[in-house]
Image (cartoon, grey):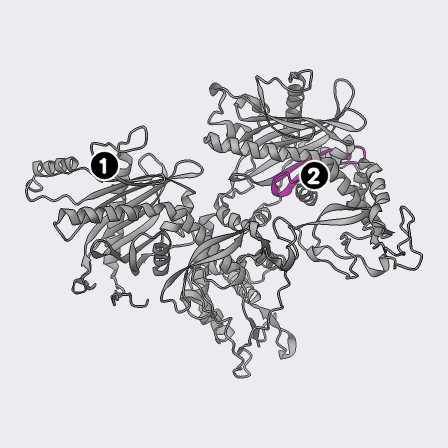
Amino acid sequence: MSPSKNGITMPTLELERHDEKMMQELAATLLQQNLDQYSSLAVTPDGHPDSRSWVSIQKREGIRVYKESTRQQQQQLRSQAATGNGSVKTAKVPPSLLLMGTIKGHLDDVLYASAASTTEAMLTKSKFIDDGAVDCKVLARIVEPTMADPMHFLNVTWRCFALSEPRDYVCLDVAGWGHTARGEHVAYHLIHSVGFDALPNFEHKGVARTNMSVCWIFRQRTASLVECYARGFYEFDTTNAMLNSMSLHAIASQWLSCVKLVAYAQSMKLARLLNCGKGVISSDGSESDSGDFGQFGSNPYNQTMSSSTSSSSNSVVLLPAPPEPARVPASRCKLCCKSFRFLGASRRVCQACGEDVCSRCSVKETLVLFSRSRQSVRERKKKFCKQCVADAMRSDAGAVARDDFVAVAQAQHNCQDFHCVPRQQADNSVRGNSVESTQALTISAIVRLGGGHVVLLSSRPYWKPGGQPRRISRTTVVLDRAIALWRQVCGESVLHTQERDRLQSSTTMSKDDLMAQSLPRLQLSSKDMKAILELSVSLLETNLTQQKELRLTRDGFPDSRVWREMQRKEGVRVFKEFQSPNSMPSGNSATCMRAGIAHPEQSGMPSLLMLGTVAGSLNDVMYASIPTSTDSMRARSKFVQDGVVNSKVLCCVESPSADDPFHTLNVTWRYYSLSEPRDYTCIEATGLLPNDYGELVGFHLVHSLEFAQLPVFRNYGVERANMSVCTFFRQKTSTLVECYTRGYFDFHSSNDMLNNISLHTISTQWLSMARYVECAQMKKLVWWMRVRTGRDSFASSSQSSSSTSSGGIAGIRQHARPRVQAGTRCRVCNRGFGGFLRTTPRACACCAEWVCKRCCVKKQMCVVSSHNKSKVNDKKLVFCAQCIAEGSKSDAALILREELLGHRSSYSSTRRTTMETMETLDD
């Protein structure tokens, strides 16, 4: 650390084993005392302390700071005198401050910002929130963060403040998680002055060494509010009451900086996005313009070396990184897809993802970074797109802290493992590490890495034979090292190809893709399948009864005394049921629903109702609804925008048959990004059945069910919620389909405002049903393209002759597209393409015939990428009017049968086979 402005340099502290143990015992005692004080504090119904004991001196937003009244101090003096601890004249009670209030955010973010376990983290925190600390340093580390608890530490720190008089403190600094006497889960940050003879003081430079004891306690009050509590005692070196009062007011102003903790956590997350995306900022937020590797020294991968060592088989040669290709500016904004105007005046480049966005979709965020010389902390404003900012806000602070721990463990091994060290020595040094560091380095394979390229000369099995080196990226180097550590931790001598591919694919996966991949394939017994089948039948009968009992007006609307309209779109309306206080959900409503309750309306959970009509046929609507596979679910969600970020079919209980192609019964997983991220594990059933009047009715049932085999993702900040939704479709006229949907939701939250926001979001997603017929038309066109082209990937409608197009959608091969010859005419209207005003021909993506501009239409296509199954390609392709008409008139049931025949070589009624197998196993 460089010397401070006043020439003060605080040395590091070497502690013995018994001193460290004494510090841990002192921290535990002080923490317990402060937790007891927090639990026993008497507050008014408004959340304020007793005005006879505390006087408000400052406030900011939702935070207030109180000073202990003189009368309260006199009472403490008398109690001390009565117990014999001192006389009234000689006893001293240090001034005390109290902070109470709430800030917007999440508890993990507040602790992530408050718990600064390194010197650089302390400096960047003080610079961002402006807490008055001029200089600070970590003198000794007693308890360091771990993978299991990355935000818990115990350090000895030094802080220097410039108050009315300069003062410094040597303190015990501890942070982590705890529980109150009432069992509440809280986060704490304790700072308590301690003395060490080995540390110098700076009274000769006008800096007085004083004492303080401050404890911060944070509790998640609601889903979006964190309750803050702080109690502090200060002992000043002067008896001047006026100076002490000024110092207390200055400290109170510094305490109010806690309102910026959530913003600081957001800044650190964005700094990590900047690091993961471009590699210009280290994991602790430090700027590194010249290729520095943050606080861990120079980056061995970015050195521009071109020398070679001996011709040994274990030698390492570092070559300069090849020049990166020139960046091609995009023609449209990444988020709103608006084209950039003349000269690109509104173009902005996101510093995290590197994509081009417009000025309306970009935000300037303040980051606190270290200078290149690492001697000062600077504030820099960086431009980010709104999507990256939202991703940073939604990211779990605990997972980010674990990534920081992984980055620290990885950087500690980088120099000794790959900085001109033989491969064998590097492997031996890795094997000598602890299991904690080994696991951290194994997990570090999923961290995106960039930088220079490394050429290794070795006889390892992954090098080219004959001593010919091959150039590999830094990600491959780290992946190879992670595989070696995987073998060491798991005790496996051979790593299977599938496991290596899984590690390699995880380097570019998003959070929802990682969650989907971690979900195993459900293994259900015959009894489980039979129970699921019986539950679906019972739920279907209950919903049919509810639909019959629903009273409608002459206009087709429900009773306004029971249902209140929330939203509408085209011919579809969504209503919310009025709830009386006596019908609020009980504490075991979630348990009942997840256990498979057949009557969710009896639990008093929030309910929604949707009524209306959509233009189309019943088969088209069912064709869009049926979840035949994970790919079909993701493509439908991408097209209709129903709010599902990711989904997966976990188990197939009953599959479609040739006699009943719309009948399915699956166990599925859905991940939604609402006001709060939530996921659901559900049974999902579709099919056709006759009603009391003999009319054919389609149904789509989704009901939450609990499975012990499936993990939860609370570490990702995703809550496992419950729902029960059933939809019925009926052909009302030859061109209209009547829709009815009833749903119940349990969000595991008692905050009515957040629940109402979630219900409004769900109602908006339900309105996407108006696009089901369009989705069916899209799926038909996709099938026709597969049939006519004989391929699974589809072409772009661009007039370029390139054989490939971006986004993983392959282009039409040259022999599949006819050349424009003399006399070529439009396929539909037979109009020629010559003449004075030459008409540009367009090729139909389905039939590959030339059509004019008037006879073609651009249609949105959503197809799962053949290279990356977690990505859904969304692109507009050109179709001629004749192909669109043929696709619209084609029967969805016949197309679905053909699709099922294409997926199975020998196709039969799988439902009947499954039931026969179940009966055989039961016998």
Residue type at the position of mark 2: Pro
Mark toward the start of the polypeptide (1 vs 2):
1
Against 420, is 258 above or below? above
Residue 577 sits above or below residue 836 on the image: above
Which amino acid does the dot numbered 1 rest on?
Val
Picture quadrant where residue 689 is located: top right
170 above or below 548? below
Is residue 654 one of those drawn in magenta?
yes
Q: Residues within 10 Å of mark 1 (few under 14, many from 20)?
A: some
Is residue 860 toward the left or the right of residue 886 in the image? left
Q: Is residue 330 visible?
A: no
Foreground disc of the pair 1, 2: 1
Q: Which residue is mark 1?
A: 55
The disc at residue 858 is none
Q: Quadrant of residue 44?
A: top left
As displayed, is residue 542 above or below residue 307? above
Q: Tag 2: Cα neighbours inside 10 Å, few (<14), some, or many (≥20)?
A: many
